[in-house]
Image (cartoon, grey):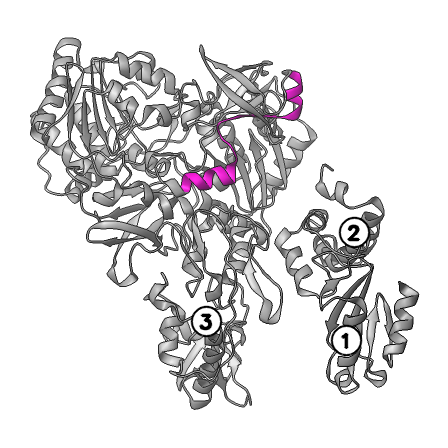
Amino acid sequence: MTKTSCTVLSARVRSEIDHWMLRYPPERKRSAVMEALRLAQNENGGSLTESVMDAVADYLEMPKIAVYEVASFYTMYNLSPVGQHVINVCTNISCMLSDSEKVLEHLKERLGIGLNETTADGKFTLREVECLAACANAPVAQVGKKYYENLTPEKLDALLDELG
Amino acid sequence: MSDIEIEIDGKPLKAKPNSMVIQVADEAGIYIPRFCYHKELSVAANCRMCLVEMEKSPKAVPACATPIMPGMKIFTRSPKALAAQKAVMEFLLINHPLDCPICDQGGECELQDLSLGYGSANSYFTFGKRSVADEDIGPLIETEMTRCIQCTRCVRFGDEIAGLRELGATGRGEHMEIGTYVQHAIHSEVSGNIIDLCPVGALTSKPFRYTARAWELNQFPSIAPHDCLGTNIHVHTRTGKVMRVVSRENKETNGTWIADRERYSYLGLYHGDRLTKPMIREHGVWKDTDWQTALEFAVKGLQDVIHQDGAEQVGALATPNSTTEEFFLLQKIMRQLGSSNIDHRLRQIDFSDQDSFSLFPELEVPIADLENCSTFLLVGSNLQKEQPLAAISVRKATLKGASVFAVNMMDYRFNFKVADKKIAAPHEFVFALSGIAKAFLPELSELSDVLVTEQDRLIAERLRAGEKTVILLGALALNHPQAALIRWLAHHIAKASHGAFGILTEGGNASGAWLSGAVPHRAAGGDSLQQAGMDAQTMLQQARQAYLLLNVEPEFDCANPRMTIEALEAAKFVVSLSVFKSPALERFANVILPVGPFTETAGTLVNAAGQWQSFRGVANAYEESRPAWKVLRVMGNLFHLQGFDYESAEEVLQELKLLLKQSPAHAKEFKGTKVKKPGNFLSRIGEIPIYAIDGLTRRAEALQATQSIIEGDLAAVRVHSKTVEELGLRSLDVAKVQQNGCEIRLPVIIDDRVPLRAAYIAGGIKATQDLGELLGPVEISV
């Protein structure tokens, strides 16, 4: 294969995509696009670039625009570079009633950045998200793949110290 | 299954099961408003404008996505239906700008029309409207994406019809946008259809932009002369001037769509090269003159040659885009003068089997039936670029399960799947095709030297097994130096696989040319002549003393531009009926008579399947140009020839039709010769690029700009990476290209679609006009 996908995607990512492709009929292999994008994003430092998306399109033999559509539809694909830790603060109704505003304010102040921004050292990216389905323990934030619940400014400080 | 009975607005109707409500309503003439629904596209049901009331349903249902059921009762104008439709309209208008006065779609806008019926004068919406940044998607289509209502017709067209998905819906919810997401110019050669499809002013024609309002235009039906299918078009004119071209549906030919070539070729109509007055050259100096003087000068010049050198010293060449009437009159003049040297097959060089043709080089399948064929074999055809709408039909067939095989000189990327292919350099092409033929007919002595590979056997097997097989020959097969042998092989393959044989000719009216006698060996009506005249190639090789040309630009339109120009320059007298002037024309012609293009003349085109389509002149004559048939008629009078008293183009056609009533039956019996092993040399693939096929498209600037985007730099030599190494070249080196003693310099581009021992050097363009044969040997060196 003289495909661009081979130079952009690592052998490991390609073999993992192959594994996902096995779940679908060969003529529907594009169904693996979401997993492929996730794997490619992980390898690319947490975000997708045009060349990575093109490589996924090439590998799954689907139109490039169809990959852009998927990548731009789901918020968990990052289309611009993000920090090492992405902090997703829920501001939906339950969290809002439990003072998620304060959580957000505290984070903005402590990190010195606004929403959808990344700290200068490239450590943290701050984002606001809709319901994370953990309302019982509001307010909630997701950092990386982990949930942090019943948040208070003190808990946040401890968390940031630990991560930073 | 039997028909289902339903009721729409109290009207009892019958329809096929699986129909949608909107289809049944459309057939019954009951209008339901819609934006996203289109009969040729899949159902998306995302605009919700077609909501109607259904009995026993608490909510209104979308008519485009609701299959009919027995006893169903639909109300399209009930208070509930109207309320739903008005509510949808209100939502659609929330973000739609109120810029109708400066919108090109104004006056022909589906949203504008429907908002008149369903929109409210006031809006409850007090927030800011959404706006979307525009993208530049190429020279043909202008975008104004803030106006987009996200019906996704354009996206579905690319995906389903064109087979090239370039537009998409990125983002979601409020942030969803239709576009290419990255900087990208649309590559599809049928892209203009999304302008017709767009229900609002989001996608409009870029060249037409701000030049006219819809209500100022007159619409006339016409036929575009660029493809051999006879694409139906609507020409829009304002005060007698063509302003744009849009599609016209004809199920028998082009279906619903037209290609960009047909849509935008009108841009060349009023090019600066248009001839305004008759011109004559006296003592080497060109001067404008009046028609009478020019015609008398032309007739006298030709008569002088006939008196001195004999009538057989006159040759006539005509572009295959000419109308049937023009062909008929041209050959009538020539034959009455005593010469049968007339031809329209300008880019062909092998005519050895011309007596084996039936009345014309026909496509044995109705065009509308192509999409129902099961197996295709493309022979020397870049179908998608040569006949874009035929490629769409083939694509439709493949989506229904058809298989396509190709024997080509270049590994083209098609918008349909190719099951298997053989790619061979031009001089190895016949040998490659013979393998498949021999797999069918091992006993043919002509094929004794040919080896049959496993691939040949498999392809032959599939062609034989095909329920409805069709063999399609394209321009490269016709222009090949061994075209007769290719036809013989292909015809054999077609017969052996019980399939149809089809020739897709260049130009819009090759069939008309054959039928009206614009070939050297047959009279009008198809009778074989005792004494055949010279074909297009012979009358240049054995140069004549005088030529009569009809819209020929020899440096671009002929098989061997260099030889043609030399023959014309050496001739004593050349008369050219032409739409455009060119430096070459001024060098070799003695009289230039300005004639009108297809928009300014009445005429008839006959397509590859033999369908006759007449059209009328729709625009005013440009300056002093005149329809070519009238010019030829007057020339006939000035020569004092018999039967040149036609009052109209229809009378010319009537005369031809009478002749055709007694036309003979020619058996299609191609003859073969021994197929030899190919030699080892480099040959040129002189394909004519999509927008270089005739004088009009070559002068449509937006098409030229598009061509360089979709085809890359054509002023280059494209060769396989291995060939580059063998020749000791590197990419982007400027190489010396030699052919028949002429030499030019072109940059080298590596292109692995080109087979070994071949070099792609396009014809029909300025950069290569000094070269020789399109498909002959070529030498490339540092």
Q: Amino acid at mark 2?
A: Asn
Q: Residue at x 23, y 49 (%)?
A: B241
The secondary element bearing badge 1 is classed as helix
Q: Report the span colored magenta.
A: B703-726
The answer to whether dots 3 and 1 both sit on one chain is no
Q: Amino acid at mark 3?
A: His
Verify CB contact (< 8 Å) between mark 3 and mark 2.
Answer: no
Label 3: chain letter = B
Q: Which residue is nearer to you in this view: B657 or B771?
A: B771
**Residue B93 x, y percent position in the rendering:** 45, 75
Q: Single out the mark in the foreground, 1 or 2.
A: 1
Tally of marks: 3
Residue corresponding to mark 2: A44
**Residue B260 x, y percent position in the rendering:** 42, 47
Is B31 situated above or below B591? Answer: below
Mark 1 neighbour density, 10 Å: few (under 14) some (14–19) many (20 or more): many
Q: Which residue is nearer to you in this view: B735 or B634?
A: B735
Nearer the N terminus, badge 1 or badge 2?
2
Residue corresponding to mark 3: B96
Q: Which residue is nearer to you in this view: B331 or B185?
A: B185
Q: CA distance from mark 1 to mark 2?
A: 28 Å
The secondary element bearing badge 3 is classed as loop
Q: Residue at x 52, y 35 (%)?
A: B712
Residue A140 visible within the image = yes
Q: CA distance from mark 3 to mark 2?
A: 39 Å
